[in-house]
Image (spheres, grey):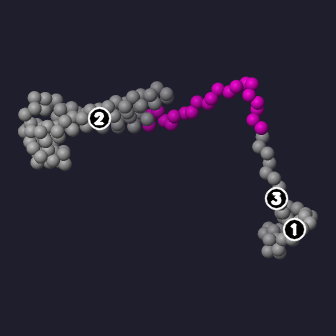
Amino acid sequence: MAALHLLAVLVTFGGLFLAIFSTVCAASIVVLAFREGGVGAGTLALLCTPYAAYWAAARSTHRRRWVLLVGWVLGLVLSGGMCLASSVVRKMAGPLQAVPAPTDSAAPAPRAPEPPPPPRYAPQYAPQYAPPAGYPAPPPTLAPIYPPN
């Protein structure tokens, strides 16, 4: 199971790398559109992705325009596929199991929790209890709700 989790992490980072590569290619195409086509073509390429692809394929005169265009589209497709593959591998691997920490044999055993202190005045548990001297008796409205067994 740990190998599947490692594979999922590697596929995730591979997809992240391809997404960053695709973003760099797209940004390069937009910069070329601003340089070669002016403000109008650059702004349109920045705001409209299909126009950026059209401009890179049909109007650009850059010598590596096809490398940028293929890198952009292929990076998008492969990063999306790797994202999907990562989620499938994570589902196959199941939840990540925590490994218990090693125990020290010389460590003392844990103490049992102490019981809670008894209530100060609980007539339903101790009807013979009277409040200490100086304390007023509780009003009759604070009588037990349930009769004692």
Q: Is residue 73 magenta?
A: no
Q: Are marks 3 and 1 in contact (CB under 8 Å)?
A: no
Q: Which residue is mark 1?
A: 135
- Residues 94 and 33: in front is 33
Element marked by disc 3: loop
Residue range (magenta): 91-111
The span from disc 3 to disc 1 (Cα, nearest Å) is: 15 Å
Task: Please name the amino acid that badge 3 sits on.
Answer: Pro
Write down the residue under mark 2.
20
In the rendered structure, are the residues bearing label 2 and label 1 in contact, judged by CB atoms less than 8 Å apart?
no
**Does residue 1 appear anywhere in the picture?**
yes
Residue ID for mark 3:
119
- Secondary structure mainly formed by the magenta segment: loop
At mark 1, the secondary structure is loop
Q: Is residue 73 left or right of residue 60?
A: right
Q: Nearer the viewer, residue 91 or 142?
A: 142
Q: Is residue 102 magenta?
A: yes
The amino acid sitting under disc 2 is Ile
- Which corner quadrant holds the C terminus? bottom right
With 15 as the anchor, is 138 left or right in this view? right
Label located before the other in sequence (3 or 2)? 2
Residue 26 marker: none
Q: Choose the circle earlier in sequence order: 2 or 1.
A: 2
Which residue is depicted at the point 10% across and 32% down?
62
Task: State whether residue 120 is above or below residue 67.
Answer: below
Mark 3: few/some/many CA within 10 Å (<14, 14-19, 20+): few
